[in-house]
Image: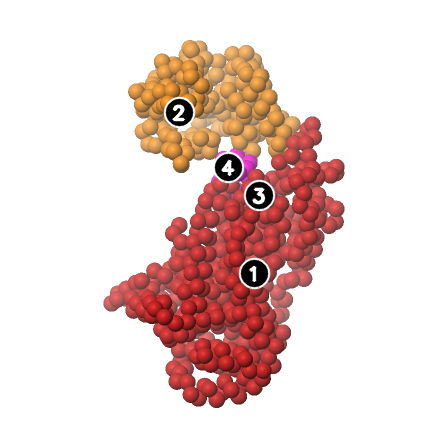
Chain colours: A orange, B red
Amino acid sequence: MNPLRHTFISRCLDTTPPSTNPLPEELRYLDIGCGGGIFAESAARLRTTASVTAIDPTPDVLAIAEGHKRRDPALMTKGKLTYLNTSIEELPVPGSEAEKFDVVTLFEVLEHVNAPGPFLESVISNVKPGGWLVLSTIARTWTSWMVTNVVAEDVLGIVPKGTHEWQKYVNEGELREWFAEKGGWGGNGGVKAMGVVYVPGLGWKEIPGGEAWGNYFFGVRRDG
Amino acid sequence: MPPRLQLNALAAFPPLPIVRLRVQFQRRLASSSTPDIYDVVCVGGGPAGLSLLTGLRNSKITSNLKVALVDGQDLQKNRLRKDASLESFSNRCSSLTPASVKNLQEIGAWSHAAQARIQPYQEMQVWDGISGARISFDWDSARPILSPRSPTQPTTIAYMIENINITSTLLSRLEELGGVHIFSSQNVSSIALGTEAPDVDLSSWPVLTLSSGKQLAARLLVGADGANSPVRTFAGIPSRGFDYSRHGLVATLKLAGPGWGGPDHKIAYQRFLPTGPIAMLPLPGNVASLVWSTTPERAAKLKALPESDFVAMVNAGFRLSATDLEFLHTMSSGQEEEVAWREQHTSLDTHTIPQKVTAVQSGTVASFPLKLRHADTYTGERVALVGDAAHTIHPLAGQGLNQGQGDAAALVRTISRAVQTGQDIGSVLALESYNSERYAENNAMLGICDKLHRLYSVESGPVVGLRTWGLKAVDAVGPLKGFFMNRAAGGV
């Protein structure tokens, strides 16, 4: 899954007509719900990354992330990768637009949130003009209900029971609509989606149109 | 990729260890002083290791990795001299496939090669020493029946090149690219896992201590350190296989002429004898390279012969019957006269066998034991193996060095993908695609060459009939031959 996150972010950054506020050569990331830091570490290793701020409200997973980070000297450079034990609601919003982030990421978080609207408001207040919000989640369809609630939790037991509440899932069309109504987002081609599916033995693969019925990436740019 | 079937032939040279290291293997924690941190540390400056480093330095994606090369030998001293005479050639040569050459071109190395010392060849003659059944390979006879020759059709089957020319070429390109920390003439005295400190935890990182006392920590440690790879031993990766109880005898030969096809159409020859194949590969001018796989006893015998008798035995190897050869090896002296006498009583179509050997370049007769080895895996936590460290093959198809070049190119691709997605290039997960891409392919090649060796070790009975029929059948069908030649060329 993690390489696909980079594939999708690169696609957002490289294949969208430029905004009036071009992003710098080296990007600043904010990773929300970083967990053990798989994405945060990989983003921090990229040549094009200035810094990564990664937040998670659970102290235990952050301790794991900090321990793993120490195993790579390249990540120990001061300011390269910073973990903060906080929720997005409690993270102080940057004082100026310039201090906001070039790329804000939200991977496999949205499906666990009770009130997606207010939550997304807190998230996007950290995106700078011309910057991107990139997220991944899962559509609310009978396929996803079957896969996550029945197969993953009940049959295979690879995910703790009660992890997923299917009613909370957000569809790609709903996200597009939400940002369109909000205004100031997604102009000049700045909305993108990519469906992905898990293929046993092969791992996560891109599947055209998959955003309509299963796991998907969604990227939206703040107008410059 | 599908396995490359190799009916054709030929020479690879001695997979002698490139680095000779005395290493203590200890999974204890390394000592106190702080090691220098590298992304890639390659142990072994042979063709595979140098090709890997050149590939990494040549690509924009990987050029910001901090890389080091460690070799126990003096890399500068072992370089081809610019003024080296075209009268003498090293006895360690390889038959580079077009796929290997293409990779060397892509990493910007091929233009640095001493081109006058490289001999492309356009035809191969392979025959059965017992039945005489023969197959000839050239791109013209391999085309489909009645179809015109395509202008883009390659004419070169492979390129004979001295191994020292390959390593010198790669070193020149690496110098041009710069940025590699080279620790030449320095042995690895130990490899151990690093230590955990409050600020950084190197407990999963291999730390090399060099004979100079210098310590290098490797995000990814590459073992390009030959068949007895100390890196492989450190990683605890077993290597399995067996010895063929055969030796590969090599020599640089002087022939009566530039070959039957002249200087522009060079021919390689391989004859399968019950003791193993004897092959003669063309070098520039009237020079050729010999690889004769035979029993250790016969190899010792041949090496001990005076030049004139040795020359006669090589000529006999391509001309006389297996029975004649057996007798000749029992003679204590006088092979030259005996071969001359027996040759008069053997009918030969001289143009289907190599031109006569007239002399041996002094000091080039050598032999080495033939082995088959394959490591259980090519990757471990922060370790990857390339070339002979991963696999040792029977030289009858000349694929050893080409496999190492294929490994290096594949590892560069794997590292590039990992860098592009921010993965730790030393992690097992990031390295997995290298192992899966190369293991099956190399294993198939090892198996095919081993089977060919066994097939042609049989001296009589139905097997001889079957293999004769098979060889003739392939020879008669142009497109099928084209298929085999494509596989031999590395699938390009």
Does residue B192 lie above or below B154 as drawn? above
Q: Amino acid at mark 4?
A: Leu
Q: Which residue is mark 4?
A: B429
Q: Amino acid at mark 1?
A: Pro
Q: Position of residue B259 (x, y in %)?
A: 45, 78
Residue A200 in the figure: left or right of residue B426: left
Q: Which residue is mark 2?
A: A156
Residue under disc 4 on the same chain as residue under disc 1: yes
Q: Amino acid at mark 2?
A: Leu
Crowd rating for badge 4 (residues with CA inside 10 Å; few <14, some 14–19, many 20+): some
**How far apart, in angstroms, are the residues tagged by discs 3 and 4?**
12 Å
**How far apart, in angstroms, are the residues tagged by discs 4 and 1?**
30 Å
Crowd rating for badge 1 (residues with CA inside 10 Å; few <14, some 14–19, many 20+): many
Q: Which residue is mark 3?
A: B383
Residue B207 in the figure: left or right of residue A157: right
Residue under disc 1 on the same chain as residue under disc 2: no
Q: Give the residue furthest to the left.
A: B146
Which region is colored magenta? B415-430
